Image (spheres, rainbow, N blue to C red):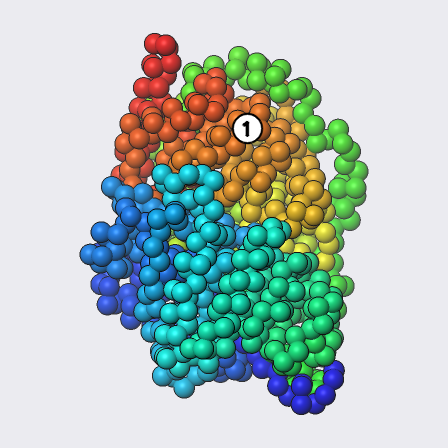
Amino acid sequence: MTTKSAAAAARATVYGHPRQGRGRELKKAIEGYWKGRVTADALRTTAAELRRTHWRQLAGAGVHEVPTGDFSYYDHVLDTTVMVGAIPARHRETVAADALDGYFAMARGTQDVAPLEMTKWFDTNYHYLVPELGPDTVFTADSTQQVAELKEALALGLTARPVLVGPVTYLLLAKPAPGVAADFDPLTLLDRLLPVYAEVLADLRAAGAAWVQLDEPALVQDRTPADLNAAARAYRDLGALTDRPKLLVASYFDRLGDALPVLAKAPVEGLALDFTGPAAANLDGLAAVGGLPGKRLVAGVVDGRNIWVNDLEKSLTTLGTLLGLADRVDVSASCSLLHVPLDAAAEKDVDPQILRWLSFAKQKTAEITTLARGLSQGTDAIAGELAANRAALASRAASPITRNPAVRARAEAVTGADSRRSRPYAERAAAQRAHLGLPLLPTTTIGSFPQTGELRAARADLRAGRIDTAGYEERIRAEIQEVVSYQEKAGVDVLVHGEPERNDMVQYFAEQLDGYLATRHGWVQSYGTRYVRPPILAGDIARPEPMTVRWTSYAQSLTAKPVKGMLTGPVTMLAWSFVRDDQPLGETARQVALALRDEVADLEAAGTSVIQVDEPALRETLPLRAADRPAYLDWATEAFRLATGGVRPDTQIHTHMCYAEFGDVVQAIDDLDADVISLEAARSHMQVARELAAHGYPREAGPGVWDIHSPRIPSAEEAAALLRTGLEAIPAERLWVNPDCGLKTRGWPETRASLENLVAAARTVREELSGA
């Protein structure tokens, strides 16, 4: 550390907080509003209570400066679209009639109007709504939400800092609006957008903001000189404003690289940088540019994306180095705590030994405030916390829970032959067509069917002991019978059992694999009101017994049509879990792949001819920097092939991906060597079909024709039109017809109507093709 005065300046802060509430009150209130059971005023009251609770908890834990503007009813990027007035033309009438209903219409669509496209927020499992912009876009400032939340926090007597998506990241995340040329660059609108940000900043200053945080995570990606020049211009102009608060420009998820000197030279008062994982390189980068003399540095030294306890002594060492590189150093998590659950102490079922290794949002906040205190007052002031932290880290390092010699020996014995199919695709395709006898444009679904209230109640009844295992399984059998019967009547070609026994596509498997830990209250927002409980990878992975064979075989016994076996792939099992940080991800992926390989073999032996191994997270987990991608893609694709490479040629391997920018991973999709891939395509208007064609993808593909994340019921003609667009890129003999994703979030009435329209569309286009 340097001087005592520099250390004394250290304060604790965070960039954002989980939104849902301890009992997911926000989810329940929003979904109640959609169903007409909760009024708009009641929804707003619930939201305000949650914000006040979060702020008071943060302040009570020792956070000096709480964030505002990070709360959202659905998505913070959509909130930014509202803030800058970039409402798509098709939604303006609804927004003008009722702002709240219009907001949800942009997020979810209506029967008559499509929603905004949705995709992954950088390399996380959080989804944002993609802004739609064009050369005619007119921006107008609407700081109502941001000002109101700031005033709420200030009224509680708190020091508050509004957090906004920065203008450069907002434009880099945007896409050309429908009807706009595909080569339109939204970044050309920067000069039009900056005055709107200036107006919002002035409004926030007038409302009492001393600082405003502008998040620019897009700058941690590989950026062109034009992008960097845009960032320099943006913060030159915003920094030159006289009527504004102090500006804190934040980045996270990776190292800034070439963007760091741009931001360091900008006339802003502070930077917030990530110093965890690959972003630890920001430390050397900061030293290389001469530090931030006269500026504030908010140091993200606590991992905001994983759930393991922080190494406090290591973080203090980093913070001590940073003290010499900035005028003032404050302490924070590496990013918003949106990406972790609320409170590890709520997990009463977790082994106490493991619980001491875990750190959720509440525990991370305590780590941040402890580090700030240690930085300001010296290590003697936190001696007790440091001792407890050393003991927790040592306990985990020495625990036999983390290592299984048999698993490690098997993984080390894997050879290249284990991850290759026995026959090339052309021979497999011929064998599969002969074996399965499917029609042209075969129809299928992605796997899950609606998770009804009755199914959730059955699981709750089983946990509570109100029914026994036999009673629960009888309900599952009845649901599978209904799902199979319905698909046969609807005319679906390749059926699924509907997954009624599964709570989540990752958690279900994690609960049956050694080495995984499931939580009861560890909810994390995925999108909108969709929350998941990512399991925790605590040790080496092994499969004690078959996980899916029983219910898949039961479904197959009910029909002569093929029923798909449904598994979650190794990359997604990692991406949607909290992974180990004590070994390379590739090693963990190989362990998961071997467990899945055993399951695939058992499904095939039981007579399952079509097996789907979903990898929706393949693109999501792609490193943000191009230099880091080849190594990731090598182990990611190898893990998929290891899981699927042992089957016969006539067993058809499917995979599925959704809600991502697929163009970045087309070669990797090819390298998976799956026989069929289904992909999200409805909101993006079949873009992925064109990307596959441009790559020369040689296998079968099902670009989705039904956006299942909207309550809209697509007409048969709408689905047929998308199919015709798909046929422009993919030959009919290789084109499948399916929804974008699984149906668990939809209700039965819309599922029936939409699926029947999908089958009708396939039938119509088949007839057109045969007529030609």
Residue 210 to residue 229: above or below: below
Element at label 1: helix
Whether residue 541 is visible here, answered yes or no, is no
Left or right of residue 247: residue 374: right
| Residue picked out by circle 1 | 694
Nearest the eye: 273 or 111: 273
Q: Is residue 309 left or right of residue 725?
A: right
Residue depicted at x 79% and y 38%: 413
Question: Does residue 220 sit above or below 241 in this rendering?
Answer: above
Indicate the quadrant where residue 578 lies.
bottom right
Percent of width and height locating residue 445: 42, 32
Q: Position of residue 238 (x, y in %)?
A: 48, 69
* Horizontal side, residue 580 vs residue 201: left or right: right
Q: Whole-percent x and y of residue 447?
A: 45, 36
Please report the residue visible at 31 percent of the width from the left and 46 percent of the height from the top. 109
**Residue found farthest to the top:** 771
Question: Considering depth in this image, is 27 or 344 the residue closer to the camera?
Answer: 27
**What's the residue at 62%, 86% (across, down)?**
9
Q: Where is the C terminus found, in terms of image quarters?
A: top left
List x then y, in percent, for residue 750: 28, 39
Asked whether residue 626 is in view, the answer is yes
Up/down of 374 relative to 338, above or below = below
Residue at screen point 44% across, 59% down: 191
The kind of residue on which mark 1 rests is Ala
In this rendering, the answer to whether 329 lies above or below 593 is below
Q: Could you tell me which quadrant the N terminus lies in?
A: bottom right
Q: Among all residues in the image, which is located at the extreme left?
A: 97
Badge 1 local density, few (<14 within 10 Å), some, or many (20+)? few
